[in-house]
DNA sequence: TTCCAGCCTTAACATATTTGAAGTCGCGCC
DNA sequence: GGCGCGACTTCAAATATGTTAAGGCTGGAA
């Protein structure tokens, strides 16, 4: 028999994440924990959890680690279309479609839970608060995707990277992964480039600029946002699109 | 009493659109037609159907005309994040969120139907095929949004515009708005610029290039794709992300 | 008819960003 | 203990795209 305490800890990020969108019932939380416990898995950095073209028959819930949703063009150009963070669900609803149109790859070691389509449908059917929270998360992901389009389409490099950092900061907050304005930041500059539609060289230049302005410290896989207010201003960042019910 | 024939015609694009995703039941179609008939409205070019910041309390279904979803930065820069075509639903599911994070504006005269939240929920609850088709459409919109991120992030101007044209072509096909490879194309070059993240001047340059290559004819608000195969090749276009069940 | 506004087009010029190449640093592996 | 690899950094040169400005066309309003 597993330690219930351990399992609760594992599910913690998901519960926090979903709770930021909808109040979850005790029963829903219990069911979710059970489902997670039943489907635990691990992945190594570089490994794809799902690949473009795969049939969709299950849902994944991320418990720890960072991942990227991405698409690749025939000639190798890659675009990361979103990051997936602890507590996020991969495609809770995409199972309405039959085939994945993008891949999801681990950027770090990852622990996650797989829930088969049937079990997942049952889960949602048995607790309304859970279902709503999941749908809601899916809608927020769409909103994030829209904002990325704006970010890449209309912001210049400096604003663009600043904006991405602000977003990640705001998304890590509710899952308790920010400490004193600092967080683990396991993303390489190449990932950053693929996420912002820039070249690695230019990402590097731009990060230097952000450092020089004293807005961030980024070193040893750790990001510290020194002046969040100014960073948000230079990014033209507004958190509204994250639709997060803020306590306050 | 309205002519039932007229109403059927009005709802035609929606039915076609949704049918491309899920087989609709007769009953579902009838309910949908009734709902549309009850909420008919019009908008003029330039008018916003919904604006960023608006509370969300109803759903809109587009019957005719073109619209754009867009966001505006404080300093006026605008990014169109998607086009909305006849048969599309505006945010069938966004009502899970409380506030709009973007605006939807008419590019041409538009006819559409408004369905209040309550009536819409009832509609979905009363016919499963309808509900699934709507959810499905929402998921496809997410997929489109991802592809736009890739498009703007990783394709160069020529590919980018070619890709957008291919997408619009493929989306107009199921709603029967393509005739001999031609369609009405009411989008200004400025709209095109805001949709692709380019400047108007560069869009113009690039369109000239596409014309010179003999791939398209664009004149008098009419677009003709002369060589779809080559256009798709230059765009690195694959229709998979549209998740359209093709007859064939 | 004239005027005006919106849209398209072109040119010359400015610049943000990319490309290619090379050097450094740290780290795991043989 | 050296070697190789991945990530970061920097430079200089090339180029895609943006900016500013101006002219022409069309269609509607007066």
Image (spheres, coloured by chain):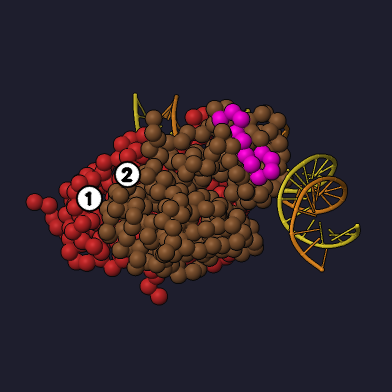
Chain colours: A brown, B red, C orange, D yellow
Labels 2 and 1 positioned on one and the same chain: no
Up the image or down, B113 lies above or below A234; here it is below
Give the magenta-colored segment's residue range: A218-228
Question: What residue is rendered at 46% in x and 36% in y?
Answer: A239
Name the one closer to the observer, B133 or B157. B133
Judge left or right: residue B133 versus residue A140: left
Q: Residue at x 31, y 36 (%)?
A: B55
**Residue B30 left/right relative to D18:** left
x, y percentage for residue A231?
A: 58, 31
Pinpoint the chain carrying mark 1. B
Q: How many numbered marks, from 0 up?
A: 2
Q: Is residue C24 left or right of residue C2?
A: right
Kindly identify which residue carries mark 1.
Answer: B120
Which image quadrant for residue A32? bottom left
Element type at marker 1?
Answer: helix
What x and y, as percent, mark residue A31? 33, 57
Question: Closer to the camera: disc 2 or disc 1?
Answer: 2
Say if the magenta span includes residue A114. Answer: no
Mark 1 surroundings within 10 Å by alpha-carbon count, few (fewer than 14), some (14 through 19), many (20 or more) = some
On the question of residue B84 being in view, the answer is: no
Q: Quadrant of residue B211?
A: bottom right
Q: Chain of mark 2?
A: A
> How packed is label 2: few (under 14 Cα within 10 Å), some, or many (20 or more)?
some
Residue B224, horizontal then vertical, whole percent: 48, 58
Q: Which residue is mark 2?
A: A23
Q: CA distance from mark 2 to mark 1?
A: 23 Å
Q: Residue furthest bottom?
A: B248
Residue A222 covered by magenta stretch: yes
Secondary structure at numbered mark 2: loop
């Amino acid at each position: 028999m597993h330690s219930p305490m351990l399992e609760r800890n594992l599910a913690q990020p998901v519960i926090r994440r979903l709770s930021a969108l909808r109040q979850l019932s005790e029963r829903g939380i219990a069911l979710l924990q059970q489902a997670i416990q039943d489907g635990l898995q691990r992945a190594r950095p570089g490994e794809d959890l799902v690949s473009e073209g795969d049939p969709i028959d299950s849902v994944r819930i991320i418990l720890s680690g960072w991942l990227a949703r991405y698409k690749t063009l025939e000639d190798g150009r890659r675009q990361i279309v979103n990051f997936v963070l602890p507590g996020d669900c991969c495609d809770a609803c995409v199972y309405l479609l039959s085939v994945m149109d993008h891949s999801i790859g681990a950027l770090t070691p990852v622990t996650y839970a797989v829930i088969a389509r049937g079990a997942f449908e049952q889960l949602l059917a048995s607790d309304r608060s859970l279902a709503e929270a999941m749908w809601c998360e899916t809608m927020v992901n769409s909103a994030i995707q829209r904002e990325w389009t704006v970010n890449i389409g209309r912001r210049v490099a400096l604003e663009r990277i600043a904006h991405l950092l602000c977003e990640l900061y705001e998304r890590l907050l509710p899952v308790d992964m920010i400490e004193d304005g600092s967080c683990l930041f396991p993303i390489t500059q190449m990932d950053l480039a693929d996420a912002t539609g820039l070249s690695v060289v230019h990402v590097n230049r731009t990060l230097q600029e952000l450092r020089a302005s004293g807005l961030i410290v980024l070193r040893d896989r750790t990001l510290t946002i020194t002046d969040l207010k100014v960073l948000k201003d230079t990014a033209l960042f507004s958190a509204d699109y994250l639709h997060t019910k803020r306590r306050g």
